[in-house]
């Protein structure tokens, strides 16, 4: 019998720039900025060397900034997906912590914060530090928005968002050290 179904199209590969950013984000969060070489990033991204400098003229440092931004955007999407359907701040915080714990569990690896492992563990560079501060303030602002939207007074929303950020960063490190995502699941009870 002849197969008359139309041939299936292969999935279109991601653009080279996107592959470079994602590969760098993955490698930097696993091994830090200094623990990763350009050849490894190019191999993981399946990209030619010339494409790196085409998209990122300053090489590894430009790529680090872009990969940290991409990783931060993924966290912002996770924050929004956790808090938007929630009926209370506590409910959103529990959902976010559960989702982060599930990421740790499913990855089978205990990666560092994708922003701090890229920008704080990189060169002592004022531009890296400013960019990290901008990204982290974005996380706090997003949580603050949801806290206020879910009924906290403006001052309380700001303080709660900052406290939650501090808990998440500390919890992330403790979960890595203990190799146990339950640390993240327990954070909302501390709020």
Image (spheres, rainbow, N blue to C red):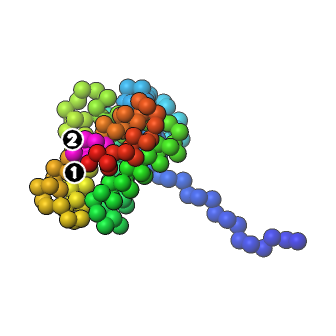
- Per the image, the residue denoted by label 2 is 133
In which image quadrant can residue 10 be found? bottom right
The answer to whether residue 88 of the structure is visible from this angle is yes
Q: Is residue 20 visible?
A: no
Residue 165, magenta (yes or no): yes
Q: Is residue 47 left or right of residue 7?
A: left
Q: Horizontal placement of 162 versus 169: left or right?
A: left
Q: Position of residue 141 (x, y in %)?
A: 21, 53
Residue 122, placed above or below residue 188: above
Residue 56: x %, y % from top left? 35, 41
Label placed on residue 104 = none
Q: Residue furthest right?
A: 1
First to last magenta residue range: 163-168
Q: Quadrant of residue 66?
A: top left
First in sequence, mark 1 or 2: give its number: 2
| Residue bearing mark 1 | 161
Secondary structure category for the residue under label 1? helix
x, y percent for residue 120:
28, 32
Q: Nearer the viewer, residue 148 or 123?
A: 148
* Identity of the residue drawn at 36% across and 38% down: 172
Residue at image point 25% right, 55% down: 143
Residue that lies at the very extreme toward the left in this rendered image: 155
Q: Is residue 143 placed above or below 54 in the rendered structure? A: below
Q: Residue at x 47, y 48 (%)?
A: 102
Dot 2: element? helix
Is 97 part of what is drawn in magenta?
Answer: no
């Amino acid at each position: 019998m002849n197969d008359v179904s139309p041939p299936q199209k292969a999935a279109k590969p991601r653009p080279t720039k996107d592959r470079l950013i994602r590969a760098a984000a993955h490698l930097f969060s696993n091994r830090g900025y200094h623990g990763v070489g350009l050849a490894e990033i190019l191999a993981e991204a399946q990209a030619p060397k010339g494409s790196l400098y085409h998209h990122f003229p300053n090489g590894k440092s430009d790529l680090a900034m872009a990969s940290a931004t991409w990783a931060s955007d993924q966290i912002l999407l996770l924050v929004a997906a956790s808090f938007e359907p929630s009926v209370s701040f506590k409910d959103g915080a529990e959902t976010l912590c559960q989702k982060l714990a599930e990421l740790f569990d499913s990855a089978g690896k205990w990666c560092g914060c994708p922003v701090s492992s890229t920008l704080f563990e990189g060169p002592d560079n004022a531009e890296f530090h400013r960019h990290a501060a901008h990204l982290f303030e974005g996380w706090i602002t997003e949580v603050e928005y949801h806290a206020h939207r879910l009924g906290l007074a403006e001052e309380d929303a700001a303080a709660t968002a900052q406290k939650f950020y501090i808990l998440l960063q500390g919890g992330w490190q403790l979960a890595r050290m203990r190799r146990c995502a339950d640390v993240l699941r327990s954070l909302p009870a501390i709020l």
